[in-house]
Amino acid sequence: MPSRTNKIRKNPTSEGKRAVLESLKSPKSVESIFLSNRLEGSEFFQKIHNICIKNKINFNSVEENEIAKLSNTGKHQGIIANLVADGYFSEAKFWDKLNSINKLNVLILDGIQDPHNFGSISRSALAFGIEYIFIPKKRSVGITAGSIRSSAGAIHSLKIIRVPNISNLIEKLKQNNFWIYGLIGKAMQENVSDLQKERKALVVGSEHDGISKLVESKLDYVYKIPMKFESIDSLNASVAASIAMFQMFKSD
């Protein structure tokens, strides 16, 4: 008979008080909650219990050492949310919804590998009003315990869409009146002269290789973050993406 620990680890988890509370803002994404019994009697324990009852989420009060066994990160603070396995949004639904939306900004991540970067970028995207994030199905990080934790649960409030091919996605976005902006760290110069577009897509490349050459060839505009010190030629992917999102979408 499989252990409860093995059953839990089939799905991604959200761990820690802040991350779990963020996950519970989208209760359909949470399958079950495991809370350390050392927290029984606390206001936090009662709050989580009430949310689970209201949303019919499986609630379990267990020993602290059981929580440690279930943890994928070791940073659980006595609480773990077991999440539904597939938290991705359908690409087909996106195209259907697009017919009723005039103004929209989307984010395209071309090969981000690090779950912490993906989580941080997702949290920034939510802060700047971006609802949709596209990622490739291959050679890219996805929704994992690490990315959920780094996003402090913000991933659950976004629509993450996996696509077979980023280049084909861009072609289809262009056919639907999107203008494509790319964050190119080593570009000789930027050519972003017009941000007042109804539909915009920002492309952010991978941590090591940046935007692929094929995708770069399809950009309408290139955005570059100016550096005052020549010795610093690039920024962390999540930092650069956050700056670019702020500059591009602040007026929307």
Image (cartoon, helix red, strand yellow):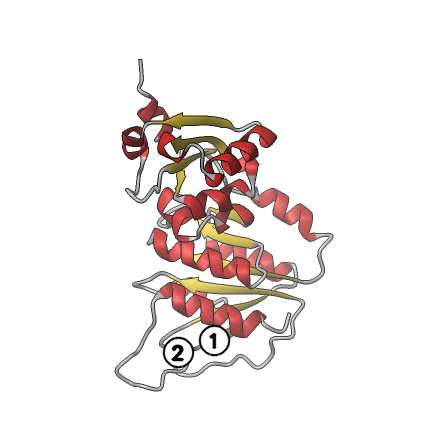
Tell me residue 147's x, y (percent).
39, 49
Q: Residue at x 44, y 48 (%)?
A: 18
Is 191 on the left-hand or right-hand side of 176? left
Q: Residues within 10 Å of mark 2 (few under 14, many from 20)?
A: few
- Residue 71 vertical position relative to residue 238 in the rendered view, above or below: above
Residue situated in front as seen by the camera: 155 or 200: 155
Is 164 on the left-hand or right-hand side of 111? right
Q: Quadrant of the C terminus?
A: bottom right
Q: Is residue 13 visible?
A: yes
- Residue 27 vertical position relative to residue 239 in the rendered view, above or below: above
Is 244 on the left-hand or right-hand side of 114? right
**Kind of residue at disc 1:** Tyr
Q: Residue at x 36, y 60 (%)?
A: 206
Q: Quadrant of the N terminus?
A: top left
Which residue has dot 1 on it? Answer: 223
Q: Residue at x 45, y 38 (%)?
A: 42
Tell me residue 25's x, y (percent).
56, 43
Tell me residue 119's x, y (percent).
41, 53
Which residue has dot 2 on it? Answer: 187
